[in-house]
Amino acid sequence: MARIGITFVWLIAAGLVAQGAEPSKATVKKLAQDLGDATLQGDYAKVIDFTYPGVVKEMGGRENAVKASEKLMKSAAALGVVLKAYKVGEAGEFLTEGGNMFVVVPTSSEMATTNGTLVRKSYLLGISSDGGNTWTFADGVGLDKKEYRDKVLPKLPAKLKLPAKEKPQIIKGN
């Protein structure tokens, strides 16, 4: 009887360890929202720290990527375009290819413009090279171009379907 009890305890413990090894959609969603919040706060160093290394490398390294992000947002603001909200949806299915895990996280951003509010739906592609313990992201903008994707990202799973690019909407008078 004691052996059965010990075996049962070991099975439960093994189940908890296996459960802990599974990536968490809630964790990925929170990290994606943290990236969006850093963007809203103008903390571009933090944004780049959340960005997939292949994208950062393509931007000329961390320092250049931070400067380019700051410049882009300042240029947009000078044109009257200011990011007002960044929201993330529920993380999709986790897929693995080689040593990398991938997940799509839908996003929605709202920007104040001189013509009203611009609403853009897109996504972040979460990438983990350590089984889901840590995550970095690539913004869906630009990932529709295969040449760019192949250059900056690792090999994607065949089952991974990236969302189609959506046309931004303008809400007049907001």
Image (cartoon, rainbow, N blue to C red):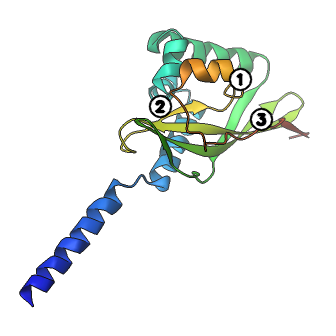
Q: Position of residue 133 (x, y in %)?
A: 36, 44
Residue type marked 2 = Phe
Q: Which corner quadrant holds the C terminus?
A: top right
Q: Residues within 10 Å of mark 3 (few under 14, many from 20)?
A: some
For image coordinates 86% across by 27% down, the residue present is: 114
Q: How many marks?
A: 3
Residue 168 occupies which quadrant of the picture?
top right
Distance between the alpha carbons at the discs numbered 3 and 1:
11 Å
Q: Which mark is residue 145?
A: 1
Which numbered tag is attached to residue 50?
Answer: 2
Label 2: state its secondary structure.
loop
Residue 130 x/y as whole percent: 35, 39
| Residue highlighted by disc 3 | 165
Instruction: Say which residue appears at 62% left-offset and 24% top-offset.
Output: 149
Whether 6 is drawn above or below 86: the answer is below
Q: Earlier in the sequence, mark 3 or mark 1?
A: 1
Tell me if label 1 and label 2 are in contact, CB under 8 Å: no
Q: Earlier in the sequence, mark 3 or mark 2?
A: 2
